[in-house]
Amino acid sequence: MNRMTLDLWVGIFVAIGLAALLFLALKVGNLASASSGETYVLKASFDNIGGLKVRAPVKSAGVVVGRVSNISLDLERYEAVVTMNIGNQYQFPRDTFAKIRTSGLLGEQYIGLAVGGDEQMYKPGDSVKKTESAMVLEDLVGQFLFSKASEGNDKASGN
Amino acid sequence: MLDRVAAVLRGLGSRVTSRLWRLGFASRFIFATLLYSGASFRRLSLTIREIYFSGVLSLIIILVSGLFVGMVLGLQGYDTLQRYGSSEALGILVALSLVRELGPVVAALLFASRAGSAITAEIGLMKATEQLSAMEMMAVNPIARVVAPRFWAGVISMPLLAALFSAMGIFGGYLVGVQLIGIDEGSFWSQMQASVDFREDIVNGVIKSVVFGVIVSWIAVFEGYDSEPTAEGVSGATTRTVVTSSLAILAADFILTALMFRGA
Amino acid sequence: MADESAEKNVLAAGAPLVNISDVSFAYGRRPILTGINMTIPRGKVVAIMGQSGCGKTTTLRLIGGQLKPSQGEVYFDGQPVHTMDAGGLYTMRRRMGMLFQFGALFTDSSVFDNVAFQMREHTDLSEEMIRDLVLLKLNAVGLRGARDLMPSELSGGMARRVALARAIALDPLLMMYDEPFTGLDPLTMGIIGQLIRKLNDALGGSSIIVTHDVQESLQIVDYIYFMADGKVVAEGTPDEIRASDKAYVHQFVWGEMDGPVPFQYPSAPYREQIYGAAHA
C-alpha cells in the first residue's frame, strides 16, 4: 500500500467520521437550538407539576423559548418551584400566565407561557406570579365521574 | 473422597489465581503501553497506518450494518408506535436507541470481530515468528513500535465508527419511516430534535464509544502479545479477543448506562 | 600439544568481548543452565553446539539481556549485562546483531524497509544515505536486486540472507546466529556459512553461532563449546573436537545412533513388554 493512498484513505475516514458526529450534534440533537445565545432565569411555583421533568421545553405560542433547569419543593408552602432558563431574546410581560400543558393526550409535559398585555417585563430571577397547575388525569376522571353521578342524581330526583 | 474434594478445591484455586495473575499482567501491560505511547504521536505515520487497517477497513461493515439496523428499527418502531397513534415519534425512537445504545455497542461488537481479531492475530504471528524478539534485539521496544500505535488507532477509530453507524442508522430509519411508510418528514426530524439532547444523549454516546474503543483495543493487543507463540496459540488468542471483548463491552455498557442515564 | 597452548594464548590475548562466568538459569524450578563458563574473544567465530533443548538458545538470550541469569555474571565489552536496566540494555543492543532461526523478517515491510529498519529507528541519516547503506548491505549478501520484494516472496535461503543484511545494518560488534542453517539445502547452507565467516572478518567483530549442524560449522568456526543438559561438556578448536575421544562429542560429531545419548526413550525392558512379565 502506497503511503500517499493510505494517508488519503485515513483522511477521508476521519473527515466523514467527524461529519457524522457533526450531523448527530446539529441535525439529530438540539445543539444548535439549546446552546445558542445566553439565557436568563425565571421561576414559577405550582401546586402540582404532574409529570413535568427537568429539560422539559418552555413554549410560548408553541415556540420553544427555553427549558426547565431545576425542580424543587418549597418546604414553607409545600409548592413545587420550577426554575426555567429562557433565551435572552425572549422577554415576557409581568402578567404572563405559566401553565403546565401536555403535548397530545399522553405526550410529554411542558410549560406554556400565555402572554398578557402588561408594559413592564419580567427581569432575570423574577418569579412568575400567575400559574396554573398540571391537570392530573385521575382528578379529571374523578371530576367527570362525579359530575355524571350528580347528573344521574338530578335526573333521578327529577323523575 | 476427601482427596477428591481437595483436588477440586485446588483446581478452583489455581484457576482463580491464574486469572488474577493474568489480570494483573494485563494491567501492567496497559500501563507500559501508555508509558511508551510517545512514539505513536511523535511519529504519526505509525498510527495513521494502523488507523487505516482498523478504521478504514471496518468502514464497509459498519456502514452497511448501521443502515440495516436503522431500517429494521424503522419498521419495528412504526409497527409498535402506530398502535398508540404516535407514529411521528418514530424519529425519537430511532435516534435515541441508536445514539444512546445501538450505535456505540453494535459498532464496538463489529469492531471487535473485524479489527480486534485482526490486531490479535497480527501481533500473535509477529511473536510466533520471533519478529518481536528481533525488534527487541535491534534495540527497538516492541510495545512502543508495535503495540501502542495499534492501541491508539483503535481508540481513535472507535468513536468515529460509532458515529458513522448511528448516522447511517438514522438515515436508514428515515428511509423506511419517511420515504417508505410516509410519516411526515417535518415531524420526523423536529420530534427527534426536540427530544435528543446534545449533552445527555450524544456526548454520553460518544463517551461510551471511547470507553469501548479502549476496552477492545486493550484486549486485542494484550491477547496478541500474551499469546502462545504457536499456530494454535494464535488462533486461540484470536477467539478469546472476540469473546472477551464482546462480554466486556456489554458489561461496561450496563455500568455506563446506569451511571449516565440515571434519573433521566 | 603445542597447538593447543597456542590456541589458549590467542583466547587469552586482550579482554574477551563476552565473558560468561558460572552462570545458572532456571524457568521456574526447571533448571536450564547450571554453572556455565564461556569466553568469546574479539575477532573470532565461536560455535555453541549441542542437542535441541540443551540450553544453547538460552545462552544467547542471556548475552542479549532478554533473560537474566539466576546466578553468575555476564559481561559484554566489559559491561555487566546481568545488572543492566532497560535503557542500558537498549543502548548495548545497538552494538549487537542477531540472526533468528527463520529470519524473523517483518512480514509487513519490503526487503529494503527491513534492512533500513534500524537505521531509521536509531540514526538521523537522510533517506539518500540510508538508501546507499541499505544497498551496500544487500550487496554484501548478494540480494541488491531483491530490494523491492516482500518477505513472503523470498525463498528460505534468501530470507535468511536478508535477515543477515538487516542484522549487520549498524555494523555490530557482536553477531549472534540462532540456528542459521536450519531448514536449508546444502548449497544454501554453504553460502550462509561462508557469509558468516566473511562478514565476521570484514566487520572485525566477533560471532557466536548456535547450531546443531556439526559438519558445516566445523569448517568455519575458530572455537567450539559443546553443551549437554545445561552444562558445557567439551570445548576446543575444530581439530581438537574432531579428534576428541570423549564419548558424547564423538557420538555427536559422527552422528552415531547409540551412545551416551541413548537411542531408546526410557522404558521397561523389551522382552518384558513383548512377552509379559511371566515369561521374562
Image (cartoon, helix red, strand yellow):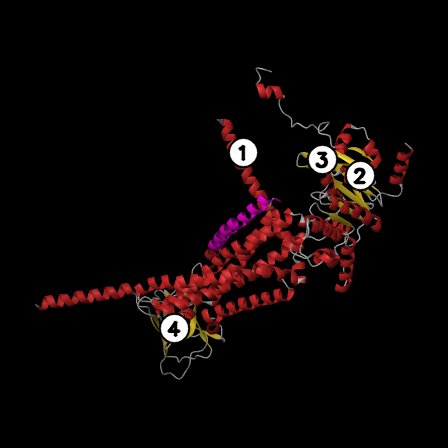
- Look at the image and give the residue range highlighted in magenta: B229-255
The residues bearing labels 3 and 4 have C-alpha atoms spaced at a distance of 78 Å
Distance of label 3 from label 1 (alpha carbons): 37 Å
Neighbours of disc 4 within 10 Å: few (<14), some (14-19), many (20+): some
Mark 3 — residue? C51
**Mark toward the start of the polypeptide (4 vs 1):** 1
Q: Which residue is mark 2?
A: C218
Marks 2 & 3, CB-CB < 8 Å contact: no
Q: Main secondary structure of the magenta part?
A: helix
Q: Label 4 marks which chain's residue?
A: B
Query: What is the chain letter for disc 1?
Result: B
Name the element at disc 1.
helix
Using the image as rendered, state which of residue A151 and residue C61 is in the foreground.
C61
| Place of residue C78 in the rendered image (x, y in percent of width and height, measured from the top left) | 83, 45
Categorize mark 3 by other alpha carbons within 10 Å: few (<14), some (14-19), many (20+).
Answer: some
Circle 1 packing at 10 Å, graded few (<14), some (14-19), many (20+), is few
Label 1: which residue? B10
Q: Nearer the viewer, mark 2 or mark 1?
A: 2
Image location (x, y in percent) of residue B59: 52, 62
Name the residue carrying label 4: B185
